[in-house]
Image (cartoon, rainbow, N blue to C red):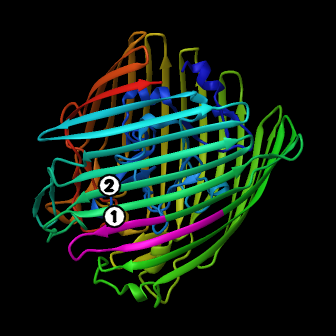
Amino acid sequence: MSIDDLAKVEIKIASVTAKPIQAQPAVVSVVTAKDIQESGAHDLKDILQQIPGFSFGLDVYSQVGPGFRGLWAYEGKIQLQVDGIEMNDGIYGNLFPLDHYAATNIKQVDLIRGPGSASYGGTAELAVISITTKGAEQNGGSISDRLVIQPGQIGNFAAGNFGYQVDKDWRISASFSFGDTARTTGTFVGLDGTELPLKSVSSEHPMELNFGVGWKGLDLRVYYDRYHVQDPTFSGYAPFPVAPNTFANDILAGMARYELQASETVTVTPKVTYKTEKPWNLTGKGNNFLLEYNRLDLDLPVTVRFTDASSAVAGVRLYREYAKSIDTSALEGGSDALTHFDGSDHVRYNDWAAYTQYDLDTKWVNVTLGGRYEHHDYSGGSFVPRVGLVKAWDKFHVKALFNEAFRTPNVEVIQERMDPGKKVLNESTTGYELEAGYQASGNLSWVSNLYLMRIKNLIGWSGTGYDNGAPMSTVGFESQVRYVTAAVTATAGYAYSRAREQGVDYYSAAPTLSHANLGMPSHQFMLSATWHLRKTLDWNFSGTYLGRRGAYFYPYVDAPGILKPEALLNTYLEYRWGNYSLGVGVRNLFNETEWIAQSYNGGSGALPLAGRSCFVQAGSKF
């Protein structure tokens, strides 16, 4: 997209009605299908690595999750939606971006880089990621296959999608993906120095099936997501299992949404979502952890457009969640599934919320006022307001934003609380953000922002269970520059974060790095540049630089050590003819060790992801 075209893209991830990115009352990023295609991105992690503020940390069973603005955000602090369906797992609130969510099936990714609970609820505390897959607008489809070549092993990842506007009223779409790839070819080292070679024993087997049908204002969707990982690291410390454990996170979701135009100015959009999950299911010799989770979600927003310059939305949302324990022997010390949930094998919680937002555009400034009150059976109620002031001129814009947000403790967080006689309270966040952007020409634009993020009652694992901790906060600066000509498309970004309060030692790298939290870099650079060598030939270089990070790794056991800076460079060359394409690429060109470290003191060493790999990607449109 040209700079002018991108400036005209209208979304409504943070506004009541669709508005351009620079007019959104939030710090917002948009990644298009063209951006994804040119970079050769494989999964959601590849996409997020090019967005300022996102970094990655390690959880148990070698799971990789996101950090954001110097804070560990993997556990219930970032909401992920795919085609309007929330994909965070039900028992911890986690999301899994590595080798997950096929990039070639994505039409667009919209992101709120900041608190979003006022609009999206208790898993949108720090950020919101909304994926829209390719659909009926294609009137066709595509299929692709990626062959990944690593030392001593070959992986494969296939994806496809199609969509048609059958007539004026009917539309249909579907997509699929499945893979068998290596998670890493390196050697894991426990904090006691025990080495565990992971070549050929650490692998991923994701699969997605997504089907949608629409008629006029009605949209129906069924989505199946199977995310399976085989890995022997278990909790990250010896003795390691003889055979790899299987980690499985399976979600089957159905959604019905109807946009009812009640009048010229009033739109009612009821949505019903039902999810049944087998989250965090672990199987391995003597290490089973099997739960079932179901959730029914009802959302009823009413949008009123008073004038072209003012609009509002108000709504209610209710959900009911149910979890049942099947086998819980993998928990530390083991537990009886029949009494896992405070003496029962199941638990139920209800949650209801009321929310509103008013957008007013004036000659002097655009004003957004909003808020949400949400009440959960266990943790009680939270009220979070939001205020946005935005002014956009022809080429220049500024934003001043204030948001409060919260995180509701998830089912297993409540169950695994440190003190059974004490409640885990809602976590709360306050965010202050300032943004300025300028379109210098039709070829060049930049946008930068300052922020302060402060979490109170932080819900964290403390070695024996979950509890609320002292405040943690970060301050920082983020910037992106975009340059587009007929010959070159380039985006460069920088993110800086500094820990301001580190009230929970479990997450702090001090005194090793007094200004950073564990596993989180203070400095990040990202770059993606594509040379359009011919109309049918593109050559991309993309890369990420991570500054020093404090982490526990052998022999740094009693106090964190420092992981040296990493420069990860990728290149991708794609040729297209007719409806076909063929691309070749190299990931991690310099074979740099990409360390993923625990962002809390959980007793695990850092995980080395796969080193240099080559891939060939063939695609066809129809």
Find residue 383 and name its label: none
Local secondary structure at mark 1: loop
Tell me: 284 left or right of 375.
left
Q: Circles 1 and 2: CB distance less than 8 Å?
A: yes
Examine the rendered structure and indicate whether residue 479 appears above or below residue 98. above
* Residue 420, position as x, y percentages in the image: 45, 87
Q: Residues within 10 Å of mark 1 (few under 14, many from 20)?
A: many
Q: Which residue is rendered at x = 82% and y = 43% of the image?
A: 311
Q: Main secondary structure of the magenta part?
A: strand
- Other-residue count near label 2 (Cα within 10 Å), few / some / many at <14 / 14–19 / ≥20: many
| Element type where label 2 sits in the image | loop
Instruction: Measuring from the top left, give residue 352's x and y in whole percent.
Output: 69, 69
Three-letter amino acid code of the residue under disc 1 = Tyr
Disc 1 and disc 2: Cα gap in Å?
Answer: 8 Å
In depth, the one of 191 and 345 nearer the eye is 345
Image coordinates for residue 115, horizontal then vertical, percent: 58, 53
The amino acid on which the numbered mark 2 sits, given as a three-letter code, is: Gly
Residue located 44% across and 86% down the image: 419
| Residue drawn 19% across the image and 32% down it | 590
Q: Is residue 501 visible?
A: yes
Query: Which dot marks residue 600?
Result: 1
Label of residue 519 in the image:
2
- Stretch of the chain drawn in magenta: 277-297
Q: Earlier in the sequence, mark 1 or mark 2?
A: 2
